[in-house]
Image (cartoon, rainbow, N blue to C red):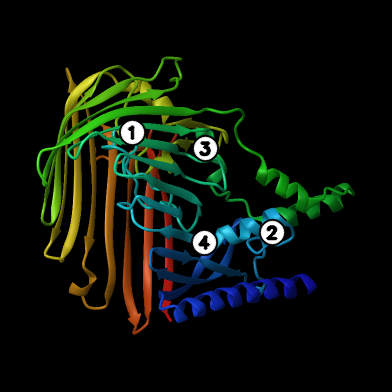
Amino acid sequence: MKNKMYTYFKIYISFFVIGLFIQSNTLLFANYIATGSFGAATIDGKIYNQISFRPEITYNKLGLGLDVNIYIDANGEIYSKNWMFSNFDTSLETIMDKIYYLRWGNRNDNFYFRAGSLPSITLGYGALVDRYSNSLEYPQVKKIGLNLIAGNDKVKFEYIHSDFKSTPGLIALETQFNLSSRSNVFINIAHDINQLSRLDEIPSNRSESDWIDWCQELEQVLELSLECSSTYDLIENQSPYEGKDPVSGISIGADYVLSDKISIYSEWAQLIGKTDNDQNLGNGIIFPGLSYRFKNGKFKLEGRHILSNNFMFNYWDRSYDIQRTIDSSNDFNNDEFYTKESTLQEYKTMNGVYSYFSYDILRIMNFLVGYQYLIKDVNTYKSFSSSININPNLIPKVKKIEFFYQNNNVSNPFKLGSSSIHGYDIGVEASDRMTITYQSRTTYRLRENGEFEPIRIMQLDTQFDF
């Protein structure tokens, strides 16, 4: 009872502090939007009712988004592991867990940063890092990343750290030199400290309460003390891998502005690491590249050339965090997995083109489409990515409509496989200040029988505005 009351007290104090912060910003003429939601979530194999409070506050160049969650089980007990203040480390982790993002300025400023959720980042022209995001599994997996830009008219630095809570899938640095008013050169370095750490992020299907019940029954049979709770935590914290498997990349590029609408560019990239058969990773180049900006959109056309085996373009893409290591375990083997790096041995020297088109149609909808076609002899590698955002004002009672699809470096980009990811976000108005949102993300993993199994992440929320 004492622990339960203490949990209530911690939650009350947290909301009180948030309320004071919002009120103080209101007096300073800050803008804020406060929304909330309730739904269901599964933690440690147990279903909880979820209540969320999501205020967003902006003041001048400062922006702050919070995501405060309360989980209540069928017995009315509050899940307390995300409200731990027993020491400095747990207190800091609890506070960081409540931050969705903290932002200063915008990407075109000489100083900009965004901490927390990183929705889409491209370095250079995307030969290495292209539309990378650390929030694809949000809110099931919350990551605290950092995107920092600092510089002046002559030189600019951009730094990316994908997650401070666990081993990051991407640490990257771009250095850009402005040679003149029309030309720039840049150098990018990207690194994944340990691709295998992805396995620690995959949620366990083991139910904590069921496992402890079974353990306690076993204690009675064996007449031994098995310390069930601590043993469960030990099992959950064990990693299904040993050692490290890093991968890195470096790219060098340049661009030249022909007019306020047209620019040409090139970018060479080298991946650094080893395939499973101990071969060095390869390199490739974008040459030539043409970018054309117009009133409501953008068009890009690139020549792409894989100069040596074991290389792919856009290695750190939108889905990298969930595809850096694929869990292919089955009923007979619980420790099967492979890395994205290990699949590079399938890629050979090739040449081809890449095109990209984005457009906003009269504020009715905006979409983007990217397509890559590489060929050598009879072998082809293709990529296709697209996203569509439809203006919800066109459809009564609809508040949000977003679709996306990505399938990179495959022979048929419209055939679902391990490189595929697709999903959608749909929000429907239930009442004046209440919206029901449905979010879906689907990836695929290869099973022993040679078929691809869909891995779905779905969430249903009821959101309300204050």
Q: Which residue is mark 1?
A: 128
Indicate which disc, 1 or 3, sits on the residue closer to the N terminus: 1
Q: In which quarter of the view is residue 438 placed?
A: bottom left
For the residue pair 278 and 39, the one nearer the viewer reads as 278
Mark 3 Cα-neighbour bin, 10 Å: few <14, some 14–19, many ≥20 = few
The answer to whether marks 4 and 1 mark residues whose Cβ atoms lie closer than 8 Å is no
Cα distance in 3D space between marks 2 and 4: 29 Å
Cα distance in 3D space between marks 2 and 1: 44 Å
Q: Quadrant of the N terminus?
A: bottom right
Give the number of the mark in front: 4 or 3.
Answer: 4
> Which residue is at 46% across, 19% downward?
276
What element does badge 2 sit on? helix
- Identify residue type, mark 3: Asn
Q: Which residue is mark 3?
A: 330
> Which residue is at 63% across, 61% downward?
82
Indicate which disc, 2 or 1, sits on the residue closer to the N terminus: 1
Q: Which residue is mark 4?
A: 99
Q: Is residue 210 visible?
A: no
Residue 419: horizontal and vertical position, in percent?
A: 34, 38
Residue 92: horizontal and vertical position, in percent?
A: 63, 57
Indicate which disc, 4 or 3, sits on the residue closer to the N terminus: 4
Q: Which residue is mark 2?
A: 209
Indicate which disc, 3 or 2, sits on the residue closer to the N terminus: 2
Cα distance in 3D space between marks 1 and 3: 32 Å
| Side of 79 relative to 116 (left or right) | right
Give the number of the mark in front: 3 or 2.
Answer: 2
Residue 465: horizontal and vertical position, in percent?
A: 41, 79
Cα distance in 3D space between marks 3 and 2: 24 Å
Give the number of the mark in front: 1 or 3.
Answer: 1
Indicate which disc, 4 or 1, sits on the residue closer to the N terminus: 4
What element does badge 1 sit on? loop
